[in-house]
Image: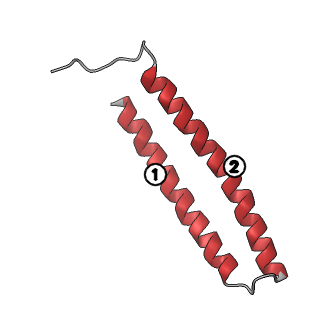
């Protein structure tokens, strides 16, 4: 049950990240390539995606550690 909750929260966060990143990409695409606004929008997109990817990777590693830990309660086999 805990595994499902962790995965559920992660997928919601991942969806929010994808929506925000898509919105930022569309904003960037609305400017002329190479313009000051386009460069700034690209910089913001990179600054947003980098920490988000790091956090997502960290969450995956922690989830794996928790789920693989020998002291974690496991359901009885049927």
**Residue occupying the point 39% across, 37% down:** 5
Q: Residue at the front extreme?
A: 33
Position of residue 70 measured from the top left corner of the image (x, y, whole percent): 42, 13
Q: Nearer the viewer, mark 1 or mark 2?
A: 2
Element under disc 2:
helix
Residue 49 percent coordinates (x, y) = 67, 57
The quarter of the displayed image where residue 28 is located: bottom right
Depth order, front residue of 12/35: 35
Which residue is identified by label 2? 51
**Side of 45 where 66 appears, left or right:** left
Q: Residue furthest left?
A: 78
State the residue in front, 4 or 35.
35
Q: Is residue 30 left or right of residue 1?
A: right
Q: Are marks 1 and 2 in contact (CB under 8 Å)?
A: no
Q: Quadrant of residue 32?
A: bottom right
Above or below, comparing residue 4 to residue 51 in the picture: above
x then y, percent, for residue 20: 59, 64
Q: Residue at x 15, y 21 (%)?
A: 78
Q: Residue at x 55, y 33 (%)?
A: 61
Q: Rate crowding at label 2 as few (under 14), some (14 to 19) or many (20 or more) other CA atoms within 10 Å.
A: few
How far is mark 1 from mark 2, CA to CA? 17 Å
The picture quadrant where one finds residue 43 is bottom right
**Residue 33 higher or lower than 54, as above or below:** below
Identify the residue under disc 1. Answer: 12
Label 1 crowding class (10 Å Cα cut-off): few <14, some 14-19, many 20+?
A: few
Specify the label residue 74 is tagged with.
none
Q: Which of the two labelled residues, at mark 1 and mark 2, occupies the earlier sequence position?
A: 1
């Amino acid at each position: 049950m805990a595994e499902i909750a962790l995965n559920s929260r992660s997928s919601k966060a991942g969806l929010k990240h994808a929506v925000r990143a898509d919105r930022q990409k569309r904003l960037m695409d609305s400017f002329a390539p190479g313009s000051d606004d386009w460069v700034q929008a690209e910089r913001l997109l990179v600054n947003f995606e980098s920490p988000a990817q790091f956090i997502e990777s960290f969450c995956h590693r922690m989830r794996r550690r928790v789920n693989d830990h020998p002291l974690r309660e496991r359901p009885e086999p049927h």
